[in-house]
Image: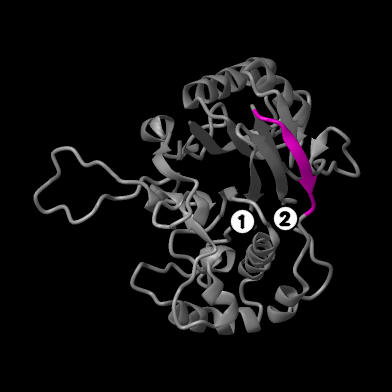
Amino acid sequence: MNLRFATFNLFQFCAPPFSYYTKKEKFNQDEWNKKTAWIKEQITNMNCDVIGFQEVFSSKELEKLTKELGFEYFATVDEPRVSKTHPNIYTSTTLALASKYPIKKISEVKANGYSLKKYNFKGTFRFSRIPIKALIEFPNNLNITVYVNHFKSNRLNEFEYIFTKKDTLKNKKEKVKEALKKDYSPALKQRLCETSSLYYDFKRTRTPIVCLCDLNDKEFSLSIDALTNRAYHEDLDRNFNLLHDAYYLYDKKVYNPHPEQKEIKRTPTSYYQSYGNVIDYIFVSKEFDKRFKKHLGKINSYEVIDKHLQENQDGSLIQSDHAPVVCEITLNS
């Protein structure tokens, strides 16, 4: 049996007559019809069982749309905030989850007090978007906890460091140490508090996990370590991942490779100033890592649906400025 999961940033899913952030930022009915038609086409072609959505203002409209496409179950855990002076203007987005299988339970993800203290977070902490944690029942009594996340936006200042595969965890922590201590990058501090809080929630979860997220940070970032790596939190000498980036768990097929090509280049999920970045991810627990002796299944495929970004790297409001990511898990027979 195969199960297909996706993360999909909808890019300002805000139904008219509502606006998002400012009065002039809104869709007319014709634009909205085009946007929802495009989203329906993507969801139909992805052929998924579970989808996590980001940038959702109009959850009722999204629930109706997904139910028309066969997703019987739908969940949100928050409402978008509305301007105090203009009731038709939303000022914050939310997350949503659509599933073809029963959602048995929705649980709250709480901020981890140890992490807030570790980063010397001042004031009242609130997730930039409240995470969804849903226990979903699949056939053969398989329960999987699915998380949907959209972490604090990357402000792209000089302290939002770009790391590579060669950077060790020790080097990364040392590089950001001063920026965190002196509050040079509040967005990075917020994101690390969010990802660390999720890590500790993962530790308490007793079922297999699939995490669908817009990380708002790049590959090899410290945010990924805070989200998944036990060594980050416990100062271990080697990496010990609680969750794994599903991209690295499937066998990639290369057809007619260039003789000088050393490895497959990962497809960006978003672009900024014509530079591609991977910021949308699907992470899974060891039960879906075929290297784990007691694995329940394996990653069969991992796709970035980016045709619209190939045509226009900036994306469009009628479509999206992100590429959906789809992961297929083949369960053991």
Looking at the rendered image, the quarter that the C terminus falls into is: top left
Question: In the rendered structure, which amino acid carries the disc numbered 2?
Answer: Ser
At a point 63% along the width and 55% down the height, the residue shown is 151
In this picture, is 264 found above or below 24? below
Q: Position of residue 307 (x, y in %)?
A: 39, 30
Query: Which stretch is magenta?
Result: 101-108
Q: Which secondary structure type mostly characterizes the magenta part of the structure?
A: strand
Mark nearer the N terminus (1 vs 2)? 2
Compare residues 239 and 61 and report the one nearer the observer: 239
Q: Position of residue 170 (x, y in %)?
A: 46, 82
At a point 50% along the width and 25% down the height, the residue shown is 47
Answer with left or right where residue 261 lies relative to residue 296: left
Residue 76 in view of the camera: no
At a point 44% along the width and 78% down the height, the residue shown is 238
Answer with left or right where residue 166 lies relative to residue 324: left
Count residues near mark 2 (Cα–Cα under 10 Å), then give few for <14, some for 14-19, many for 20+.
some
CA gap between label 1 and label 2 equals 9 Å
| Marking on residue 153 | 1
Which quarter of the figure has residue 99?
A: top right
Task: Identify the secondary structure beneath mark 1.
Answer: loop
Question: In the rendered structure, which amino acid carries the disc numbered 1?
Answer: Ser
Residue picked out by circle 2:
128
**Furthest-left residue in view?**
259
Mark 1–mark 2 contact, CB under 8 Å?
yes
Which quarter of the figure has residue 190?
A: bottom right
In this picture, is 202 found above or below 17? below
Say whether residue 105 is magenta: yes
In this picture, is 49 found above or below 120? above
Compare residues 172 and 15 and report the one nearer the observer: 172
